Image (cartoon, rainbow, N blue to C red):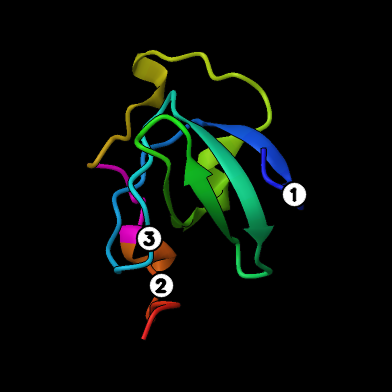
Amino acid sequence: TQAGSLGVFFVVATYSPTLSDEIDIQAGDQVEILVEYDDGWCQGINLSRGHAKGVFPKHCVSSTAPNIGPSLLIDNSSNFNKNAMKRVSSMYI
């Protein structure tokens, strides 16, 4: 882990990036969180996918190992609003 790191966390929900500063995280990946922002996003490094560095939603990670299985699949027919978790601007200019 890097100096100042908040620790290594387990990804429990997949997130696909929509802005250039976001990273792809998949259930079962391990990420090192470097910064936790007050808007519910984190900056970190995906230790499982080439050490890509970027931001991702905090609700996609847990400090405990996930139970990988069908229960982690998102039902797209539900009332879940993916647009509600989208960021409107990137950290990069």
Quadrant assignment for the N terminus: top right
The answer to the question of whether label 3 and label 1 lie on touching residues, with beta carbons closer than 8 A, is no
Give whichever of discs 3 and 2 has the lower sequence position. Answer: 3
Which mark is first along the chain, 1 or 3?
Answer: 1
Label 1, secondary structure: give it: loop
Nearer-N-terminus badge (1/2): 1
Under mark 3, the amino acid is: Glu
Q: CA distance from mark 3 to mark 1?
A: 22 Å
Q: Residue at x 60, y 61 (%)?
A: 40
Q: Position of residue 21 (x, y in %)?
A: 37, 66
Q: Amino acid at mark 1?
A: Ala
Q: Residues within 10 Å of mark 2 (few under 14, many from 20)?
A: some
Residue 3 is marked as 1
The residue that label 3 is drawn on is 22
Disc 2 residue type (three-letter): Arg
Extreme residue in the bottom direction: 93
Relative depth, front residue between 76 and 20: 20
Q: How far from the left and from the top, in percent, is residue 2?
A: 67, 45
6 displayed left or right of 40: right
The total number of labels drawn is 3
Query: What is the magenta range?
Result: 77-82
How many C-alpha atoms fall within 10 Å of the one at disc 3: few (<14), some, or many (≥20)? many
Q: Is residue 67 left or right of residue 25?
A: right
Q: Does residue 66 sit above or below 46 in this rendering?
A: above
- Residue 63 location, x and y as percent? 68, 31
Name the outermost residue toward the front.
3
The residue lying toward the viewer, choosing from 75 and 41, is 41
Image: 63 above or below 90: above
Q: CA distance from mark 1 to mark 2?
A: 27 Å
Determine the image quadrant of residue 48: top left
Residue drawn at the location 44% of the way across and 28% of the way down: 29
**Magenta includes 89?**
no
